[in-house]
Amino acid sequence: MEGFVLNHPIEAVYDEKTNRIIGRLKKGTDLFEGILAVCKQHHVEAAQFQCIGSLAYATIVQPQQNPDKSLQYSERLVTDTPVELLSGSGFVGYDEQGQLDIHFHGLYVDCDQQMNGGHFLRGENPVAITVEFIIFPVSYTHVHRKPDEYSGIPLFHFTKRSE
């Protein structure tokens, strides 16, 4: 099994038998950047992942409905305390510029025992103590963002990839 070196901000091990990667992100590592680093290390281009742990703060957006009933995202919401990430799940694929990207939603509780959650933002969710994760690579699927035909919003699309 292959993993990262000691004292690295990430511990990750690839399990060949199940084609899964399991590990943890250490204090100070950004949630998205850490997961993307693991994917790059193990040559993962498409995957689903789950995680739990703690964040120094969480930065999210949430849906809000306009008067015409259309949806949009709220302004950035940033917690003012550390949070415990109770459940998080996301997808790894490529953005419109061809860079590896993440779409992630999670549920958390803050230090005031308030639960909240939503769509997490890249680069704005540093680990407080640890985030434990499992990554499920997908080999024959291409995941890429492009504008949705209905909303025009860039969303992940899933297509079969040739061998």
Image: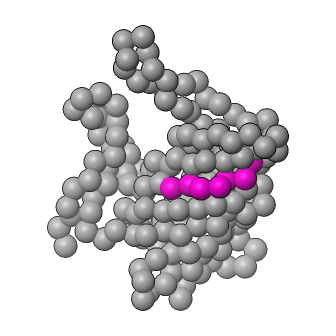
Drawn side of residue 156 relative to residue 140, left or right: right
For the point 43% across and 70% down, the residue is 136
138, above or below 67, in the image? below
- The answer to whether residue 34 shows anywhere in this view is no
Q: Main secondary structure of the magenta part?
A: strand
Q: Position of residue 70 (x, y in %)?
A: 37, 20
Which residue does the image show at 54% across and 32% down from the upper left? Answer: 62
x 72%, y 53%: residue: 84
Residue at the farthest left position: 162
In the image, residue 139 above or below residue 160: below
Q: Would residue 20 be counted in the magenta stretch?
A: no
Instruction: Residue 49: tell me if it is visible.
Output: yes
In reply to whether residue 86 is colored magenta, the answer given is yes
Residue drawn at point x = 61 percent, y = 73 percent:
23
Q: Is residue 151 left or right of residue 114?
A: left
> Residue 160 location in percent, x, y?
20, 61
Q: Is residue 113 left or right of residue 30?
A: right
Question: Is 70 placed above or below 149 here?
Answer: above
Count of marks, rendered view: 0
Pick the quarter of the image with the C terminus.
bottom left
Q: x%, y% of residue 106?
A: 57, 48
Return the x and y of residue 87 as percentages of the image width and height: 59, 56
Which of 39/86 is in front?
86
Looking at the rendering, which quadrant does residue 137 occupy? bottom left
**Magenta stretch, residue numbers:** 83-89
Return the residue nearer the eye: 97 or 38. Answer: 38
Colouring mode (rainbow / by chain / secondary structure / one colour) = one colour
